[in-house]
Amino acid sequence: QVQLVESGGGLVQAGGSLRLSCAASGRTFSSYAMGWFRQAPGKEREFVSAINRSGVGTYYADSVKGRFTIARDHAKNTVYLQMDSLKPEDTAIYYCAARVTSSSGSYLPPYDYWGQGTQVTVSS
């Protein structure tokens, strides 16, 4: 089992920044890829960003490329999502997820464990 706890959401004006954190526990942190998803009201869940087990390989959705940065800290068992130049359309609940994988390069869905989510609201 893997437990994931997100933090760092909040209300920010357009153009501002937030950093989301996701603390993981329950298994060896380096044994799973980590991802961030988001879901806005009335919309499907979107795969936003991911990072592989080593932290070398990353993925960004086109909607956030160049504005968001994912990183992981193995010493702290934590993954971060730095969100800059935020737009009102980034408003959503953001979920952290973990994928247990034997492949060091994998980070694509499906994911196995999920956090409870953190609300991000960007005002115009």
Image (cartoon, helix red, strand yellow):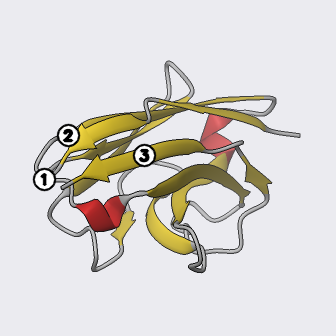
Quarter assignment of residue 101? bottom right
The first of marks 2 and 3 along the sequence is 2
Q: In this figure, which residue is indicated by the disc labeled 1?
A: 85
Percent position (x, y) of residue 34? 56, 52
Q: Could you tell whether 101 is left or right of 21 in the image? A: right
Where is residue 17 drawn, in percent x and y?
20, 40
Q: Is residue 93 placed above or below 41 in the rendered structure? A: above
Q: Nearer the viewer, residue 23 or 19?
A: 19
Mark 1 and mark 3 in contact? Answer it, CB < 8 Å: no
Q: Report which residue position mark 3 lands on.
A: 120
Residue type, mark 2 in image: Ser
User: What amino acid type is highlighted by mark number 3?
Assistant: Val
Name the disc covering residue 17, or none: 2
Q: Earlier in the sequence, mark 1 or mark 2?
A: 2
Q: Which mark is residue 49?
A: none
| Residue 96, image x, y percentages | 59, 48
Mark 2 → mark 3, Cα distance in angstroms: 11 Å
